[in-house]
Amino acid sequence: MKNLFIMSSVNLQSALLSGPRTARELASALCVSQPTVSRWLAEQRDHILVIGKARATRYALRRAVREIGSEWPVYRVDEVGEVSLAGRLHAIYPAGFVWRDAVNHRESLFEGLPWFLVDNRPQGFMGCQVVGLYKTHDLPERLEYWGDDDVLVGLTRFGHELPGNFLIGDYVRMSYCFLNEAIREAVSEDNLISLKDLRGQYPLEVGKSQSREGIRSSAGGEQPKLGEIVCVSDLQCCELLIKYSPVCTMSSGLRWSDLLVAEHLALAVLTDYNVAGALSQIFKLAGRTFLEVIRFDRTPHFGRRGIVSLEAVSNEFIGHSGAWDEQAASLLEQRLISREDYERILCIHAFGSLIANTDMHNGNLSFFLGDDFSLRLAPVYDMLPMHHAPNNHGEVIARPLRQARPTRLTEPVWEGVKAWAVEYWRRVRDDDRISADFQGIAAQYLHALEA
Protein backbone atom coordinates (compact mmCIF):
# COMPACT_ATOMS: atom_id res chain seq x y z
CA MET A 1 0.00 0.00 0.00
CA LYS A 2 2.87 2.35 0.88
CA ASN A 3 4.62 1.60 -2.42
CA LEU A 4 1.38 2.29 -4.32
CA PHE A 5 1.07 5.66 -2.55
CA ILE A 6 4.65 6.54 -3.43
CA MET A 7 4.11 5.58 -7.08
CA SER A 8 0.93 7.65 -7.34
CA SER A 9 2.72 10.62 -5.78
CA VAL A 10 5.66 10.35 -8.16
CA ASN A 11 3.43 9.93 -11.21
CA LEU A 12 1.18 12.84 -10.25
CA GLN A 13 4.04 15.20 -9.49
CA SER A 14 5.87 14.21 -12.67
CA ALA A 15 2.76 15.01 -14.70
CA LEU A 16 2.62 18.50 -13.16
CA LEU A 17 6.28 19.39 -13.67
CA SER A 18 5.47 20.92 -17.06
CA GLY A 19 2.77 23.20 -15.65
CA PRO A 20 -0.83 23.36 -14.38
CA ARG A 21 -3.38 20.82 -15.68
CA THR A 22 -7.04 20.02 -15.24
CA ALA A 23 -8.16 16.77 -13.62
CA ARG A 24 -9.22 15.47 -17.04
CA GLU A 25 -5.78 16.23 -18.52
CA LEU A 26 -4.11 14.47 -15.60
CA ALA A 27 -6.34 11.41 -15.95
CA SER A 28 -5.50 11.22 -19.65
CA ALA A 29 -1.77 11.67 -19.09
CA LEU A 30 -1.66 9.06 -16.28
CA CYS A 31 -4.10 6.62 -17.91
CA VAL A 32 -6.33 6.47 -14.82
CA SER A 33 -9.88 7.51 -14.02
CA GLN A 34 -10.79 11.01 -12.81
CA PRO A 35 -11.91 9.67 -9.39
CA THR A 36 -8.44 8.13 -9.01
CA VAL A 37 -6.84 11.47 -9.90
CA SER A 38 -9.08 13.23 -7.40
CA ARG A 39 -7.99 10.80 -4.67
CA TRP A 40 -4.32 11.27 -5.53
CA LEU A 41 -4.73 15.06 -5.49
CA ALA A 42 -6.34 14.91 -2.05
CA GLU A 43 -3.47 12.77 -0.77
CA GLN A 44 -0.94 15.31 -2.12
CA ARG A 45 -2.75 18.48 -1.06
CA ASP A 46 0.36 19.81 0.75
CA HIS A 47 2.27 19.79 -2.55
CA ILE A 48 -0.55 20.78 -4.91
CA LEU A 49 -1.96 24.26 -5.51
CA VAL A 50 -5.58 24.43 -6.67
CA ILE A 51 -6.19 27.21 -9.20
CA GLY A 52 -9.70 28.34 -10.17
CA LYS A 53 -13.08 26.83 -9.43
CA ALA A 54 -15.58 24.36 -10.89
CA ARG A 55 -14.83 23.39 -14.49
CA ALA A 56 -12.03 25.95 -14.69
CA THR A 57 -10.10 24.25 -11.87
CA ARG A 58 -6.48 23.44 -12.59
CA TYR A 59 -3.81 21.87 -10.42
CA ALA A 60 -0.19 22.98 -10.10
CA LEU A 61 2.82 21.53 -8.32
CA ARG A 62 4.23 23.86 -5.69
CA ARG A 63 7.83 24.88 -6.34
CA ALA A 64 10.25 25.68 -3.54
CA VAL A 65 12.50 28.65 -4.31
CA ARG A 66 15.77 27.80 -2.60
CA GLU A 67 15.53 28.32 1.14
CA ILE A 68 12.67 30.86 1.12
CA GLY A 69 9.75 28.47 0.56
CA SER A 70 7.03 28.36 -2.08
CA GLU A 71 4.56 31.07 -1.03
CA TRP A 72 4.77 34.57 0.41
CA PRO A 73 2.40 37.27 1.64
CA VAL A 74 2.76 40.51 -0.34
CA TYR A 75 1.99 43.77 1.44
CA ARG A 76 1.16 47.23 0.10
CA VAL A 77 2.26 50.50 1.74
CA ASP A 78 -0.16 53.40 1.30
CA GLU A 79 0.60 57.12 1.11
CA VAL A 80 0.56 57.59 4.90
CA GLY A 81 2.76 54.58 5.60
CA GLU A 82 0.06 52.09 6.58
CA VAL A 83 0.69 48.47 5.56
CA SER A 84 -2.04 46.11 4.35
CA LEU A 85 -2.12 42.69 2.72
CA ALA A 86 -2.20 42.99 -1.08
CA GLY A 87 -2.20 39.28 -1.86
CA ARG A 88 -0.23 36.05 -1.79
CA LEU A 89 2.35 34.88 -4.30
CA HIS A 90 2.82 31.15 -4.96
CA ALA A 91 5.66 29.57 -6.95
CA ILE A 92 4.72 26.65 -9.19
CA TYR A 93 6.42 24.38 -11.70
CA PRO A 94 8.05 24.73 -14.10
CA ALA A 95 8.95 28.39 -13.41
CA GLY A 96 5.70 30.28 -12.92
CA PHE A 97 3.77 32.06 -10.19
CA VAL A 98 0.16 32.33 -9.07
CA TRP A 99 -1.11 35.62 -7.66
CA ARG A 100 -4.08 35.58 -5.28
CA ASP A 101 -5.31 39.13 -4.80
CA ALA A 102 -6.52 39.99 -1.31
CA VAL A 103 -8.64 42.93 -2.52
CA ASN A 104 -10.70 41.43 -5.35
CA HIS A 105 -10.02 37.74 -4.48
CA ARG A 106 -9.05 36.96 -8.07
CA GLU A 107 -6.36 34.52 -9.14
CA SER A 108 -3.86 35.16 -11.93
CA LEU A 109 -1.29 32.81 -13.44
CA PHE A 110 2.06 34.20 -14.63
CA GLU A 111 4.91 32.50 -16.46
CA GLY A 112 7.40 34.63 -14.51
CA LEU A 113 7.20 37.20 -11.74
CA PRO A 114 3.95 39.20 -12.00
CA TRP A 115 4.41 42.34 -14.09
CA PHE A 116 3.52 44.64 -11.20
CA LEU A 117 6.43 43.27 -9.11
CA VAL A 118 9.11 43.27 -11.80
CA ASP A 119 10.19 46.88 -11.19
CA ASN A 120 10.79 46.17 -7.50
CA ARG A 121 13.97 44.33 -8.42
CA PRO A 122 17.34 46.02 -7.79
CA GLN A 123 18.49 47.73 -10.96
CA GLY A 124 20.93 50.23 -12.33
CA PHE A 125 23.80 51.94 -10.54
CA MET A 126 22.24 51.98 -7.07
CA GLY A 127 20.84 48.49 -7.45
CA CYS A 128 24.39 47.23 -7.93
CA GLN A 129 25.43 48.96 -4.71
CA VAL A 130 22.48 47.56 -2.74
CA VAL A 131 23.34 44.07 -3.96
CA GLY A 132 26.92 44.64 -2.78
CA LEU A 133 25.62 45.00 0.76
CA TYR A 134 23.88 41.60 0.65
CA LYS A 135 26.54 39.27 -0.73
CA THR A 136 25.75 36.64 1.89
CA HIS A 137 22.60 35.58 0.02
CA ASP A 138 24.52 33.76 -2.72
CA LEU A 139 23.14 35.87 -5.56
CA PRO A 140 24.91 36.57 -8.86
CA GLU A 141 27.21 39.58 -8.56
CA ARG A 142 25.93 41.09 -11.82
CA LEU A 143 22.27 42.10 -11.93
CA GLU A 144 21.93 41.16 -15.60
CA TYR A 145 22.47 37.52 -14.61
CA TRP A 146 19.58 37.50 -12.13
CA GLY A 147 16.64 35.26 -13.00
CA ASP A 148 13.18 35.52 -11.45
CA ASP A 149 14.14 33.31 -8.52
CA ASP A 150 17.21 35.46 -7.80
CA VAL A 151 15.00 38.54 -7.86
CA LEU A 152 12.51 36.91 -5.50
CA VAL A 153 15.23 35.93 -3.03
CA GLY A 154 16.45 39.51 -3.08
CA LEU A 155 12.96 40.97 -2.65
CA THR A 156 12.30 38.77 0.40
CA ARG A 157 15.58 39.83 1.99
CA PHE A 158 16.09 43.55 1.24
CA GLY A 159 12.94 44.57 -0.64
CA HIS A 160 12.10 47.27 1.92
CA GLU A 161 14.73 49.49 0.29
CA LEU A 162 13.54 49.21 -3.30
CA PRO A 163 11.18 51.27 -5.51
CA GLY A 164 7.39 51.15 -5.35
CA ASN A 165 5.08 50.22 -2.49
CA PHE A 166 5.11 46.39 -2.39
CA LEU A 167 6.80 44.41 0.40
CA ILE A 168 7.27 40.67 -0.20
CA GLY A 169 7.31 38.45 2.88
CA ASP A 170 7.03 39.08 6.59
CA TYR A 171 10.75 39.71 7.10
CA VAL A 172 10.66 42.63 4.65
CA ARG A 173 7.42 43.94 6.15
CA MET A 174 9.01 43.98 9.60
CA SER A 175 12.17 45.60 8.21
CA TYR A 176 10.08 48.33 6.59
CA CYS A 177 8.09 48.93 9.78
CA PHE A 178 11.29 49.15 11.80
CA LEU A 179 12.81 51.59 9.29
CA ASN A 180 9.64 53.67 9.14
CA GLU A 181 9.41 53.90 12.90
CA ALA A 182 13.08 54.89 13.12
CA ILE A 183 12.53 57.67 10.57
CA ARG A 184 9.43 58.95 12.38
CA GLU A 185 11.32 58.98 15.68
CA ALA A 186 14.29 60.75 14.11
CA VAL A 187 12.02 63.40 12.58
CA SER A 188 10.09 63.95 15.82
CA GLU A 189 13.36 64.36 17.75
CA ASP A 190 14.90 66.52 15.00
CA ASN A 191 17.67 63.95 14.49
CA LEU A 192 17.17 63.50 10.77
CA ILE A 193 19.50 65.51 8.57
CA SER A 194 18.05 68.68 7.05
CA LEU A 195 18.29 69.61 3.38
CA LYS A 196 20.64 72.49 4.17
CA ASP A 197 23.03 70.30 6.15
CA LEU A 198 22.79 67.43 3.67
CA ARG A 199 23.83 69.44 0.63
CA GLY A 200 27.15 70.35 2.18
CA GLN A 201 27.87 66.64 2.60
CA TYR A 202 27.20 65.61 -1.01
CA PRO A 203 30.90 65.36 -1.96
CA LEU A 204 31.57 63.15 1.09
CA GLU A 205 28.55 60.99 0.27
CA VAL A 206 29.92 60.46 -3.25
CA GLY A 207 33.01 58.89 -1.71
CA LYS A 208 30.88 56.63 0.48
CA SER A 209 28.74 55.62 -2.49
CA GLN A 210 31.73 54.75 -4.62
CA SER A 211 33.06 52.52 -1.85
CA ARG A 212 29.60 50.93 -1.45
CA GLU A 213 28.96 52.39 1.97
CA GLY A 214 25.88 54.00 3.42
CA ILE A 215 23.35 53.06 0.72
CA ARG A 216 19.78 53.65 1.88
CA SER A 217 17.77 53.63 -1.32
CA SER A 218 17.62 52.22 -4.82
CA ALA A 219 16.29 53.13 -8.22
CA GLY A 220 16.92 52.24 -11.83
CA GLY A 221 19.39 53.83 -14.23
CA GLU A 222 23.12 53.63 -14.74
CA GLN A 223 23.95 57.29 -13.98
CA PRO A 224 25.84 57.52 -10.64
CA LYS A 225 23.50 58.66 -7.87
CA LEU A 226 22.94 58.83 -4.15
CA GLY A 227 19.82 58.15 -2.11
CA GLU A 228 18.99 60.13 1.02
CA ILE A 229 16.14 60.65 3.48
CA VAL A 230 15.91 64.20 4.83
CA CYS A 231 13.70 66.29 7.10
CA VAL A 232 11.68 68.98 5.34
CA SER A 233 9.37 70.14 8.16
CA ASP A 234 7.84 69.00 11.44
CA LEU A 235 6.88 65.32 11.19
CA GLN A 236 7.55 65.26 7.45
CA CYS A 237 10.43 63.99 5.38
CA CYS A 238 11.29 63.34 1.76
CA GLU A 239 13.50 60.92 -0.09
CA LEU A 240 15.92 62.20 -2.68
CA LEU A 241 17.85 60.83 -5.59
CA ILE A 242 21.00 62.81 -6.24
CA LYS A 243 22.78 62.37 -9.55
CA TYR A 244 26.31 63.71 -9.80
CA SER A 245 28.88 64.38 -12.47
CA PRO A 246 32.55 63.42 -12.52
CA VAL A 247 34.83 66.29 -11.48
CA CYS A 248 34.40 69.09 -14.00
CA THR A 249 38.12 69.52 -14.70
CA MET A 250 37.75 66.57 -17.12
CA SER A 251 35.95 67.01 -20.43
CA SER A 252 33.55 64.17 -19.57
CA GLY A 253 32.84 65.73 -16.18
CA LEU A 254 32.07 69.08 -17.76
CA ARG A 255 29.77 67.51 -20.32
CA TRP A 256 27.90 65.49 -17.69
CA SER A 257 27.60 68.68 -15.67
CA ASP A 258 25.98 70.35 -18.70
CA LEU A 259 23.62 67.42 -19.14
CA LEU A 260 22.52 67.39 -15.50
CA VAL A 261 21.68 71.09 -15.69
CA ALA A 262 19.96 70.42 -19.04
CA GLU A 263 17.88 67.67 -17.40
CA HIS A 264 16.83 70.04 -14.62
CA LEU A 265 15.78 72.62 -17.22
CA ALA A 266 13.84 70.02 -19.25
CA LEU A 267 11.82 68.96 -16.20
CA ALA A 268 11.07 72.61 -15.42
CA VAL A 269 9.93 73.38 -18.98
CA LEU A 270 7.62 70.37 -19.06
CA THR A 271 6.10 71.38 -15.72
CA ASP A 272 5.57 74.92 -17.03
CA TYR A 273 3.58 73.43 -19.93
CA ASN A 274 1.37 71.35 -17.60
CA VAL A 275 3.21 68.04 -18.01
CA ALA A 276 4.40 66.99 -14.56
CA GLY A 277 8.15 66.58 -14.26
CA ALA A 278 10.05 65.32 -11.24
CA LEU A 279 10.94 68.18 -8.88
CA SER A 280 14.66 68.95 -9.08
CA GLN A 281 17.40 71.39 -8.10
CA ILE A 282 21.04 71.90 -9.17
CA PHE A 283 24.04 72.40 -6.88
CA LYS A 284 27.73 72.76 -7.71
CA LEU A 285 30.06 71.58 -4.96
CA ALA A 286 33.73 70.48 -4.78
CA GLY A 287 34.15 70.53 -8.55
CA ARG A 288 31.07 68.40 -9.26
CA THR A 289 27.52 69.15 -10.32
CA PHE A 290 24.66 67.56 -8.37
CA LEU A 291 21.08 67.12 -9.60
CA GLU A 292 18.77 66.66 -6.64
CA VAL A 293 15.41 65.01 -7.48
CA ILE A 294 12.54 64.33 -5.08
CA ARG A 295 11.32 60.74 -5.41
CA PHE A 296 7.71 60.63 -6.50
CA ASP A 297 7.18 57.03 -5.33
CA ARG A 298 7.58 58.29 -1.73
CA THR A 299 5.43 60.78 0.20
CA PRO A 300 6.28 63.41 2.86
CA HIS A 301 4.12 61.46 5.32
CA PHE A 302 6.43 58.39 5.42
CA GLY A 303 4.30 56.63 2.82
CA ARG A 304 4.79 55.19 -0.63
CA ARG A 305 3.10 55.14 -4.01
CA GLY A 306 2.84 52.19 -6.36
CA ILE A 307 4.94 52.64 -9.47
CA VAL A 308 5.45 50.56 -12.60
CA SER A 309 7.57 51.21 -15.69
CA LEU A 310 6.40 51.19 -19.29
CA GLU A 311 8.79 48.24 -19.71
CA ALA A 312 6.82 46.09 -17.26
CA VAL A 313 3.47 47.22 -18.68
CA SER A 314 4.62 46.72 -22.26
CA ASN A 315 5.95 43.22 -21.65
CA GLU A 316 2.63 42.17 -20.13
CA PHE A 317 0.08 43.90 -22.32
CA ILE A 318 1.53 45.22 -25.57
CA GLY A 319 3.80 42.66 -27.18
CA HIS A 320 5.67 45.04 -29.49
CA SER A 321 8.72 47.26 -29.03
CA GLY A 322 7.55 50.43 -30.75
CA ALA A 323 8.43 53.94 -29.61
CA TRP A 324 6.60 55.60 -26.73
CA ASP A 325 3.90 57.06 -28.96
CA GLU A 326 3.10 53.67 -30.52
CA GLN A 327 2.99 51.91 -27.17
CA ALA A 328 0.76 54.64 -25.76
CA ALA A 329 -1.65 54.05 -28.65
CA SER A 330 -1.74 50.33 -27.82
CA LEU A 331 -2.42 51.06 -24.15
CA LEU A 332 -5.21 53.48 -25.05
CA GLU A 333 -6.77 50.93 -27.40
CA GLN A 334 -6.89 48.44 -24.52
CA ARG A 335 -8.29 51.15 -22.22
CA LEU A 336 -5.36 50.76 -19.87
CA ILE A 337 -4.60 54.50 -19.87
CA SER A 338 -6.79 57.58 -20.18
CA ARG A 339 -7.08 59.75 -23.28
CA GLU A 340 -5.40 62.56 -21.31
CA ASP A 341 -2.37 60.41 -20.44
CA TYR A 342 -2.17 59.21 -24.04
CA GLU A 343 -1.98 62.79 -25.27
CA ARG A 344 0.60 63.67 -22.62
CA ILE A 345 2.79 60.76 -23.73
CA LEU A 346 2.60 62.00 -27.33
CA CYS A 347 3.78 65.42 -26.15
CA ILE A 348 6.56 63.92 -24.01
CA HIS A 349 7.76 61.78 -26.91
CA ALA A 350 7.72 64.75 -29.28
CA PHE A 351 9.56 66.92 -26.74
CA GLY A 352 12.22 64.26 -26.19
CA SER A 353 12.75 63.99 -29.93
CA LEU A 354 13.09 67.78 -30.27
CA ILE A 355 15.70 68.03 -27.48
CA ALA A 356 17.81 65.14 -28.85
CA ASN A 357 16.94 62.60 -26.16
CA THR A 358 18.12 59.31 -27.67
CA ASP A 359 17.51 57.39 -24.45
CA MET A 360 13.71 57.19 -24.39
CA HIS A 361 13.65 53.50 -23.54
CA ASN A 362 10.81 51.77 -21.71
CA GLY A 363 12.46 52.09 -18.31
CA ASN A 364 12.40 55.89 -18.57
CA LEU A 365 8.62 56.30 -18.53
CA SER A 366 6.49 55.19 -15.61
CA PHE A 367 2.95 55.04 -14.26
CA PHE A 368 1.50 55.27 -10.80
CA LEU A 369 -0.08 51.90 -10.00
CA GLY A 370 -3.44 51.94 -8.22
CA ASP A 371 -4.58 49.32 -5.72
CA ASP A 372 -6.81 48.02 -8.53
CA PHE A 373 -3.76 47.94 -10.86
CA SER A 374 -5.00 50.94 -12.82
CA LEU A 375 -2.37 53.11 -14.51
CA ARG A 376 -1.86 56.87 -14.27
CA LEU A 377 1.10 58.64 -15.86
CA ALA A 378 3.85 59.50 -13.36
CA PRO A 379 6.05 62.63 -13.55
CA VAL A 380 8.67 62.70 -16.28
CA TYR A 381 12.29 61.91 -15.37
CA ASP A 382 15.60 61.26 -17.16
CA MET A 383 14.68 63.74 -19.91
CA LEU A 384 17.86 65.26 -21.36
CA PRO A 385 19.84 65.54 -24.66
CA MET A 386 21.53 62.13 -24.41
CA HIS A 387 22.59 62.39 -28.08
CA HIS A 388 25.42 64.61 -26.79
CA ALA A 389 26.51 62.43 -23.85
CA PRO A 390 30.10 61.15 -23.66
CA ASN A 391 30.60 57.75 -25.26
CA ASN A 392 31.14 54.52 -23.32
CA HIS A 393 34.85 55.34 -22.99
CA GLY A 394 34.10 58.71 -21.41
CA GLU A 395 35.12 60.67 -24.50
CA VAL A 396 33.26 63.80 -25.56
CA ILE A 397 32.70 63.54 -29.31
CA ALA A 398 31.44 66.34 -31.53
CA ARG A 399 28.18 65.08 -32.98
CA PRO A 400 25.96 66.69 -35.62
CA LEU A 401 22.64 68.11 -34.55
CA ARG A 402 19.99 65.44 -34.28
CA GLN A 403 17.23 66.17 -36.79
CA ALA A 404 13.78 65.55 -35.31
CA ARG A 405 10.74 64.70 -37.42
CA PRO A 406 7.16 64.11 -36.30
CA THR A 407 5.72 60.62 -36.44
CA ARG A 408 2.23 59.80 -37.65
CA LEU A 409 1.01 59.89 -34.04
CA THR A 410 2.94 62.95 -32.82
CA GLU A 411 2.21 65.11 -35.88
CA PRO A 412 -1.00 66.61 -34.37
CA VAL A 413 0.96 67.91 -31.32
CA TRP A 414 4.28 68.61 -33.04
CA GLU A 415 3.97 72.35 -33.72
CA GLY A 416 2.70 73.04 -30.23
CA VAL A 417 5.50 71.05 -28.60
CA LYS A 418 8.05 72.71 -30.86
CA ALA A 419 7.35 75.90 -28.91
CA TRP A 420 8.30 74.02 -25.73
CA ALA A 421 11.57 72.94 -27.33
CA VAL A 422 12.33 76.53 -28.40
CA GLU A 423 11.83 77.68 -24.83
CA TYR A 424 13.97 74.80 -23.60
CA TRP A 425 16.95 75.44 -25.87
CA ARG A 426 16.71 79.17 -25.08
CA ARG A 427 17.01 78.40 -21.37
CA VAL A 428 19.97 76.08 -21.96
CA ARG A 429 21.71 78.68 -24.12
CA ASP A 430 21.25 81.42 -21.51
CA ASP A 431 22.02 79.44 -18.33
CA ASP A 432 25.32 80.46 -16.69
CA ARG A 433 25.71 76.96 -15.23
CA ILE A 434 26.11 75.56 -18.76
CA SER A 435 29.55 75.57 -20.42
CA ALA A 436 30.20 77.83 -23.41
CA ASP A 437 30.61 74.75 -25.60
CA PHE A 438 27.18 73.36 -24.75
CA GLN A 439 25.60 76.80 -24.90
CA GLY A 440 26.84 76.85 -28.50
CA ILE A 441 25.14 73.51 -29.20
CA ALA A 442 21.92 74.87 -27.70
CA ALA A 443 22.15 77.96 -29.91
CA GLN A 444 22.43 75.75 -32.99
CA TYR A 445 19.30 73.81 -32.05
CA LEU A 446 17.48 77.04 -31.32
CA HIS A 447 18.44 78.48 -34.70
CA ALA A 448 17.29 75.30 -36.48
CA LEU A 449 13.90 75.34 -34.71
CA GLU A 450 13.29 79.02 -35.34
CA ALA A 451 14.35 78.91 -39.02
Image (cartoon, rainbow, N blue to C red):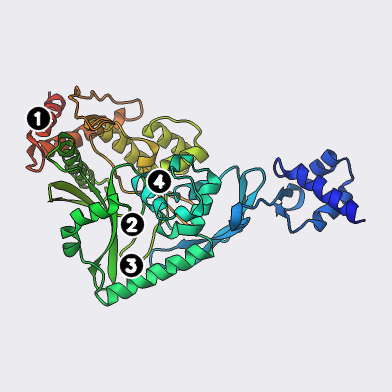
Q: Which residue is pictured at 42% across the width and 51% down the height?
A: 131
Which circle marks residue 440 in the picture?
A: 1
Mark 3 residue element: loop
Q: Quadrant of the C terminus?
A: top left
Find the distance from the CA under tag 1 to the CA under tag 3.
44 Å
- Please give the name of the residue rendered at 36% of the width and 35% of the height, measured from the top-left corner: 361
**Which mark is in front, 4 or 2?**
2
Q: Is residue 30 left or right of residue 318?
A: right
Q: Please tell me the numbered disc located at residue 204.
A: none
| Label 1 close to label 3 by CB (< 8 Å) | no
- Residue 371: percent from the left, percent from the top? 48, 57
Disc sitting over residue 215 in the figure: 2
Spatial CA span between label 4 and label 2: 14 Å
Q: Quadrant of residue 205?
A: bottom left
- What's the residue type where badge 4 is placed? Gln
Amino acid on which disc 2 is placed: Ile
| Contact check, label 3 and label 4, Cβ < 8 Å | no
Residue 186 percent across, percent down from the top left: 30, 73
User: Which marked residue is nearer to the observer: mark 1 or mark 3?
Assistant: 1
